């Protein structure tokens, strides 16, 4: 497998043009993440001569990753592409419109941050982390006990390997290919090459494993500032890394056949269609976090732990709202019910029928996360915010209907909580400052791990009774819906995201549909790309949605490579275009 070191990245030239791989260490306009490109810059040994410098670089490592994925982009765009959320800026509108169009990968596109941020900032996080790891390795080889005595070397190595892993994993989940950049040197100084996403994800999994191994074999205390608000023992940190590994292990699949079970030791590197060992997913989720894992936000400044994505998608009153494709699967319209069902709305012409004009769609649901005891339906508004026939008197535990939404994105607007805008937490605990995002916010839900475990059991012919129990942790305890049982059909991965109907006791809905539904409702906007990665692997993205994204156009220019892109409804059927096929059948939601 081709890898490059952080030292090689800084001085590498490609081809006759000697084009520097600037994007692997540059961070654009982010002065607080600036990495010098001056060829006369001091070498790593001089720059990190003091133990305090290594400790500082290590402690900031996850923050650098956080800024790559959570400050602005790509969260909004991926949520729009998944039809989880609707609204935002130009890139988000481009990815959310129906019929789908190809991603605009021009270096001059005004919202190119969607793929530039995770690429440029992700590799910046990798480069800085590699420098810290390499410095520690050098000190170990030189038996520099004085240097090593002033840092917790095993803690730094475990944390560094984790940040290496999560940064590579995000690149593999989003992009069609990437560079694998390790801290160890290569003999002979090989020229790097771009590797396909399965190889990049395989490298990320190895980095996670190294982090887990070091954490299990040593005892240390992680400071609360390294993952803000989360002091952890080495054992607790190992649980956290297992959960992150499970999340990204299942995020790699581009199509349903790639999300299939492959029981081999490393399904990412063999010739089988499945890319995931679901037995390992079951083990990781069973030995991961034991409760919701939250990160403490402290504002939106360049040095803050902020999350503009979730503020925009869940708290802002002026930018958008939950997509009907998230809310619609809750619909169980009675035969004589008024208005269009979700299925009938899907069947209408998408030209006049859009997220901006829901026309006469009415959602009927008994899911108490969405609506309180009365009434059981709500109708959308028109584009001028008129025509609201009925307003929910009592919000659900997670979402509420807000009428009179002053935006071009008019319609049903759902947020979490009656008095504070905390849609993001799904358990009525959210940031206490809705303007500046100050307070705890969920980063990994225990429900996410439970439902990944349920999917793992379904894919490996595990216990249907255990699957039902995992579903009911949220379906019954939070949604107040009738329990899933072994009497429900198992179904298949092709089953739609669906809640079922009370008219027949929900007996027709499969365990597969309920797992998909619970995961969609519970993890709404909790982490960048979750809904997009799930729906991509399930085959539930809207037709024409890009199944992956190209290397940023600006980086392709630097590398002297031809520009390219993915997606577009007109490209469905072209395997190389990676445009989603099918995904939503109105018949699945028409009663």
Image (spheres, grey):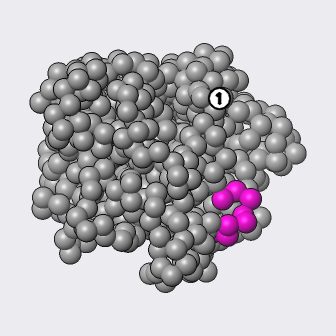
Dot 1: what SS? loop
Q: What residue range appears in magenta?
A: 105-112
Q: Residue at x 74, y 41 (%)?
A: 319
The residue nearer to you, when weighing 371 against 238, is 238
The residue nearer to you, when weighing 492 against 151, is 151
Would you name the residue on which mark 1 appears? 300
Image height check: is 298 above or below 27?
A: above
Which quarter of the picture shows residue 415?
A: top right
The residue nearer to you, when weighing 563 against 392, is 563
**In the image, residue 529 lies at what x, y percent?**
48, 49
Give the left or right position of residue 462, taking residue 230 as reference.
left
Residue 556, magenta (yes or no):
no
Give the left or right position of residue 466, taking residue 222 as reference.
left
Please name the predominant secondary structure of the magenta segment in the image.
loop
The residue nearer to you, when weighing 309 against 68, is 68
Q: Residue at x 55, y 28 (%)?
A: 305
**In the image, residue 156 lies at what x, y percent?**
29, 31
Q: Quadrant of the N terminus?
A: bottom left
Q: Residue at x 27, y 56 (%)?
A: 185
**In the image, residue 78 lies at what x, y percent?**
55, 53
**In the image, residue 383 lies at what x, y percent?**
83, 49
Residue 108, magenta (yes or no):
yes
Q: Is residue 47 visible?
A: yes
């Amino acid at each position: 497998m081709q890898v490059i070191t952080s030292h090689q990245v800084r001085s590498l030239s490609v081809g006759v043009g000697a084009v520097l791989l600037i994007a692997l260490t540059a961070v654009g306009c982010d002065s607080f993440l600036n990495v010098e490109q001056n060829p006369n810059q001091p070498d790593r040994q001089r720059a990190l001569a003091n133990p305090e410098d290594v400790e500082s670089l290590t402690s900031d490592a996850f923050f650098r990753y956080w800024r790559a994925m959570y400050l602005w982009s790509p969260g909004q765009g991926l949520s729009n592409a998944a039809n989880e959320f609707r609204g935002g800026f130009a890139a988000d509108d481009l990815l959310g419109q129906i019929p789908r169009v190809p991603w605009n990968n021009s270096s001059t596109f005004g919202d190119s941050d969607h793929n530039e941020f995770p690429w440029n900032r992700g590799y910046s996080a990798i480069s800085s982390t590699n420098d810290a790891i390499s410095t520690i390795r050098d000190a170990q080889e030189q038996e520099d006990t004085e240097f090593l005595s002033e840092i917790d070397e095993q803690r730094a190595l475990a944390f560094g390997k984790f940040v290496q892993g999560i940064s590579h994993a995000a690149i593999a989940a989003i992009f069609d290919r990437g560079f694998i950049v390790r801290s160890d040197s290569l003999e002979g100084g090989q020229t790097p090459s771009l590797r396909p996403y399965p190889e990049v994800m395989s490298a990320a999994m190895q980095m996670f494993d190294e982090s887990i191994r070091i954490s299990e074999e040593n005892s240390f205390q992680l400071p609360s500032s390294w993952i803000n608000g989360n002091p952890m023992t080495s054992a607790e940190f190992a649980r956290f890394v297992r959960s992150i590994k499970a999340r990204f292990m299942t995020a790699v699949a581009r199509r349903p056949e790639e999300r299939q079970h492959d029981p081999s030791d490393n399904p990412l590197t063999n010739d089988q269609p499945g890319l995931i060992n679901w037995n390992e997913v079951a083990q990781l989720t069973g030995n991961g976090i034991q409760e919701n894992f939250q990160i403490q936000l402290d504002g939106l400044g360049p040095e803050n732990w902020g999350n503009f994505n979730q503020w925009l998608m869940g708290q802002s009153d002026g930018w958008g709202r939950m997509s009907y494709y998230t809310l619609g699967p809750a619909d169980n319209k009675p035969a004589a019910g008024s208005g269009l069902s979700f299925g009938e709305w899907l069947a209408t012409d998408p030209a006049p029928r859009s997220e901006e004009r829901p026309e006469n769609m009415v959602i009927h649901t008994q899911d108490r996360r969405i609506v309180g005891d009365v009434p059981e339906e709500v109708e959308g508004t028109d584009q001028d915010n008129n025509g609201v026939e009925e307003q929910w008197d009592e919000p659900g535990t997670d979402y509420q209907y807000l009428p009179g939404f002053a935006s071009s994105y008019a319609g049903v607007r759902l947020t979490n909580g009656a008095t504070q805008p905390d849609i993001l937490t799904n358990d009525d605990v959210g940031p206490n400052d809705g303007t500046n995002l100050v307070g705890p916010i969920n980063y990994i839900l225990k429900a996410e791990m439970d439902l990944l475990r349920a999917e793992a059991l379904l894919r490996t012919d595990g216990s249907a009774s255990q699957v039902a129990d995992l579903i009911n942790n949220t379906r019954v305890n939070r949604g107040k819906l009738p329990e899933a049982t072994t009497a429900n059909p198992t179904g298949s991965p092709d089953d739609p995201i669906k809640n079922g109907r009370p008219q027949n006791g929900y007996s027709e809905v499969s365990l597969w549909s309920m797992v998909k539904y619970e995961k969609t409702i519970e993890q709404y906007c909790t982490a960048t790309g979750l809904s997009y990665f799930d729906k991509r692997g399930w085959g539930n993205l809207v037709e024409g949605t890009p199944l992956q994204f190209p290397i940023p156009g600006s980086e392709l220019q630097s590398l002297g490579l031809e520009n390219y892109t993915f997606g577009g409804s007109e490209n469905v059927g072209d395997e190389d275009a990676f445009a989603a096929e099918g995904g939503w059948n109105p018949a699945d939601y028409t009663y």
